[in-house]
Image (cartoon, grey):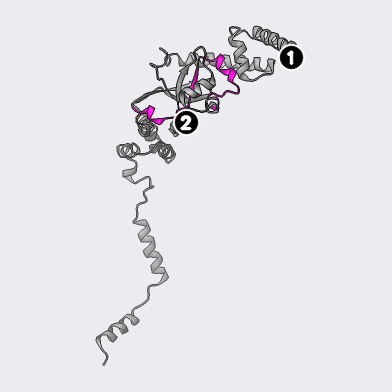
Amino acid sequence: MGCCGDEEEDNLLHQPLISSENLEITAKTTVESTISPMNSHFSALICRDILRIIFQKLPIADIARAACVCRTWGSVASDRDIQTTSFKAPWKLKEIVGDPISGSFWRDNSLNKFAISHRIRSGDSVASLAVKYSVQVMDIKRLNNMMSDHGIYSRERLLIPLSNPDILINSICYIELDVYANREAAVLYLEGGPPENKFSCSTSRATSELAKKRVIESVRRSLQVDDEIARYYLSITDGDPRSALSEFSEDLSWERQTGLA
C-alpha cells in the first residue's frame, strides 16, 4: 500500500493526454472570442466622439497616419478644429489663420514650417537681414528659393526662418503661399498683420502670379539667366519683357566695354 502522494501520481499518469485536435479547437475558440482593436465592428473605434477625444491628444504626424486607416478615421482626422489644435499645440500658438492649398500642409508642423515676413526696405541686403534675425545667409536663400543676392531687389518681402521658437508663443500665424519661395508656410508678422483683403482675393492673385511666372520663365530663357535676374530686369521695366531684354543687353554691353564681363 503506497502513500497518498503515490496514488495521486498514478492517477495523473492514467489521465488521457490532450490531443493536437483538441488544442487546435481550443486555440480557435480563444481567437474567435477575442475582438481585434482594428475590427471595423469594434464600436469604440468607430464612434466619432471617442475618436475626436483621442485625436485631439495626438501629434500632427500621427493624425496624418490615422487618416489612412479607414473612411471614418479619415473623416474625423480631416476635421479643421482637430488639425489646427494639433498644429498649434507644440508651439503654443494663439491662432492659425487661412486655408492651405495643399492638404499635405497639415502633415508637418516642424519649425521649418514657420517663417517671419520681412517687408523689403531701402538698404536691406540678405547679409544685413541674416544679422538682424540671427540666422544664416544660406538659410534665407534656401527658404526663399534664391540663387543669388540680387533676388532681393525684385521682391516686396522675404521669408525669414525662425531662430527662436519662443517667438511663436501666443502669436497668430497666417497660412500663405509665397510664389517666389514656391512654398506654403505659416507666416508670422512681427509688425501688424498681412495686407488687407489678402485672403479675399487669393484666387485672382494666384492667377496673376501664374501669369507672372510664365513671363519670368520666358524672359529667363531669352536672357539665359536665372529666375532672380529675370525678375530684376522685369521689375525695373514695369514687367515689359521687350524692355527687360533691352536693358539686359545694354548692361551686358557696358560690362564688356569696361572689362567686367
Could you tell me residue 112's position as x and y percent?
Answer: 47, 31
Q: In this view, does 38 lie above or below 174?
A: below
Which residue is nearer to you in this view: 3 or 97?
A: 97
Give the secondary structure at mark 2.
Answer: helix
- Residue at horizontal 30 percent and vertical 39 percent from the top: 50
- The reply, left or right, for residue 147 in relation to residue 135 is right
Quarter of the N terminus within the rendering: bottom left
Say which label, 1 or 2, has the lower sequence index: 2
Residue tagged by mark 1?
Answer: 259
Mark 1 nearby-residue class (10 Å; few <14, some 14–19, many ≥20): few
> In the displayed structure, would residue 59 be above or below residue 181?
below
Residue at the disc numbered 2? 112
**Residue 63, x across and y down, in percent:** 40, 37
**Could you tell me which secondary element the residue under label 1 belongs to?**
loop
Q: What type is the residue that disc 2 sits on?
A: Asn
Q: Check residue 196 for magenta coloring.
A: no
- Which quadrant would residue 89 be assigned to in this image? top left
Amino acid under disc 1 = Gly
- In the image, residue 54 lies at what x, y percent? 33, 40
Q: Nearer the viewer, mark 1 or mark 2?
A: 1
Q: What stretch is highlighted in magenta?
A: 141-169
Question: What residue lies at 74% left-to-right and 14% top-to-bottom?
Answer: 259
Figure quadrant of residue 126:
top right
Give the x, y percent position of residue 105.
46, 29
Residue 178 visible within the image: no
Q: Distance between the residues labelled 1 and 2?
A: 43 Å
Q: Is residue 103 left or right of residue 48?
A: right
Question: Which numbered tag is attached to residue 99?
Answer: none
Residue 21 horizontal side relative to residue 211, left or right: left
